[in-house]
Amino acid sequence: MPSNDAVLGLKCRVCGKMYPKAANFFCPDDSGPLEVAYDYDKIKPTVSRAKFQARPRNMWRYKELLPLDGEPTVGPQVGGTPLVRADRLADALGVERLWIKNDAVNFPTLSFKDRVVSVALSKARELGMKMVGCASTGNLANSVAALGASAGLDTVILVPADLEKTKIYGTAVYGAKVVKVSGTYDQVNRLCTQIVMKYGWGFVNVNLRPFYAEGSKTVGFEIAEDLGWRFPQHVVCPMAGGALIGKIHKAFTELSRLGLVDQEVTTKMYGAQATGCNPIADCVKSNRERHKPIKTPNTICKSLAIGDPADGYFAAQLIKNSGGWAEDVTDAEIVEAMQLLAKTEGIFGETAGGTTVAVAKKLIEQGRIPRNEEIVICVTGNGLKTQDCVFEALDEPATIKPALADFDALAGLAAAEPALV
Ligand SMILES: *Cc1c(COP(=O)(O)O)cnc(C)c1O
Ligand SMILES: [Zn+2]
């Protein structure tokens, strides 16, 4: 395996101590999480806009800014999702310039998790791991199972037992060993840490977490490139563990530092959560130094239901330092926003998408996001996985006999005047 000497190692986010680029994930001195550190002076002469743009449109066009030693071997087609100009949703929200970063159509499992998993599993292979897995609120399970299967890796996946059926069977179908744990996500996660310590397996969001999280930067790279190598003024992002929001900002910082965007990063970052599990939003709103863990999350937005988020502290700090804010919304607001997004833009996002759109709406109404500036809303997962949540809000379609008279009798549908035939 060639060694990529632009990747310096793993750095403790608390004390700054460096560790080797292996399956290390916390600093024994202070339990601080580790983050990949790069030598940007080494990277700078190897990257350019033209070089990135000449490559296939997927997340690996930015591979110099990802932490692998060799070429990616898992998920070579992940990423490259559309940045959709959302004029109809903008009208509905009363803003001028709005985009949706649509990771509901990410390949292969329809959520942004495919980005983080392809980095983590490519790394797992570099480290010679055969058994991989994760603790998951659903989307990560789908992604580890699918990408693990495509790479011929054995996968074990632990989920809270009350997870949506679609996400459990949508994981088992790939041949993954799925284990339902009767407990909250945080209890599942603790168990996974013990499994990792005992068996040394590669759990993408436990001991591979520093590599995993870097994959999220590609959302930020793509947003900036698709805006014409610029940054938006406002980004609204869903938060579970709190990694994605930080990595989008880290991506902007790297592009600026490497001269790929001729602009300082002044983007304000806004975090979105469900009221039934809002540790990071609560931390920001109550101006607490650290989040208060939520013991029993209670929301339809299960994909974001992490009561004690690993990156909660850093996400809250970033939001405040960037000049942004965080909010949370009720389940009813989530369902309404899922429909609003679908009806205005033809995009069916999952509950996390509803959460993010609803939070954007709330922040605009509060005057925290100005109506005349550029806003990007991140829709990170697909509504087909959480359809049950919208069933009750929708009218049951009419059933008729196969007769034109029955169709004509439907109120509001048949034309008032006969059309030309
Ligand atoms: C995991 C997930 C998130 C949040 O990611 P974090 O990096 O853990 O904050 C957002 N949206 C969806 C759909 C997810 O599955
Ligand atoms: Zn440390």
Image (cartoon, grey):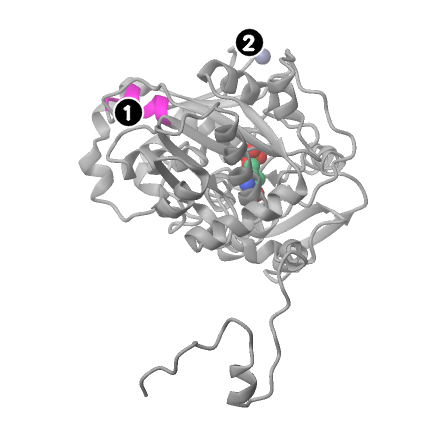
Three-letter code for the amino acid on which mark 2 is drawn: Cys
- Residue at screen point 39% across, 47% down: 88
Magenta part of the protein: which range? 252-259
- Give whichever of discs 2 and 1 has the lower sequence position: 2
Residue 84 % position (x, y): 35, 46
Q: Quick check: 98 above or below 19?
A: below
Three-letter code for the amino acid on which mark 1 is drawn: Ile
Work out whether residue 393 or residue 419 is closer to the camera in this orientation and state it: 419
Instruction: Give the Cα distance between marks 2 and 1.
Output: 25 Å
Work out whether residue 162 or residue 301 is closer to the camera in this orientation and state it: 301
Residue 99 % position (x, y): 37, 40
In the rendered picture of this protein, how many numbered marks are placed on residues? 2
Residue 337 numbered tag: none
Query: In this view of the protein, can residue 131 be seen by the observer?
Result: no
Image quarter of the N terminus: top left
Q: Please rate how many residues cluster around mark 2, counting C-alpha atoms within 10 Å: few if below 14, some from 14 to 19, many from 20.
A: some
Image quarter of the C terminus: bottom left
Tag 2 secondary structure: loop
- Residue at screen point 54% across, 56% down: 149
Find out if the beta carbon at label 2 lies less than 8 Å from the nearest ligand 2 atom. Answer: yes
* Residue tagged 1: 43
- The image quarter containing residue 72 is top left
Tag 1 secondary structure: helix
- The image quarter containing residue 329 is top right
- Residue at screen point 69% across, 27% down: 308
Q: Quick check: 192 above or below 36?
A: below
Instruction: Kindly check if marks 2 and 1 are in contact, taking CB atoms under 8 A apart as contact.
Output: no
Residue 193 belongs to magenta span: no
Q: Quick check: 352 above or below 110?
A: above
Question: Among all residues in the image, which is located at the extreme front?
Answer: 417
Q: Please rate how many residues cluster around mark 1, counting C-alpha atoms within 10 Å: few if below 14, some from 14 to 19, many from 20.
A: some
* Residue tagged 2: 15
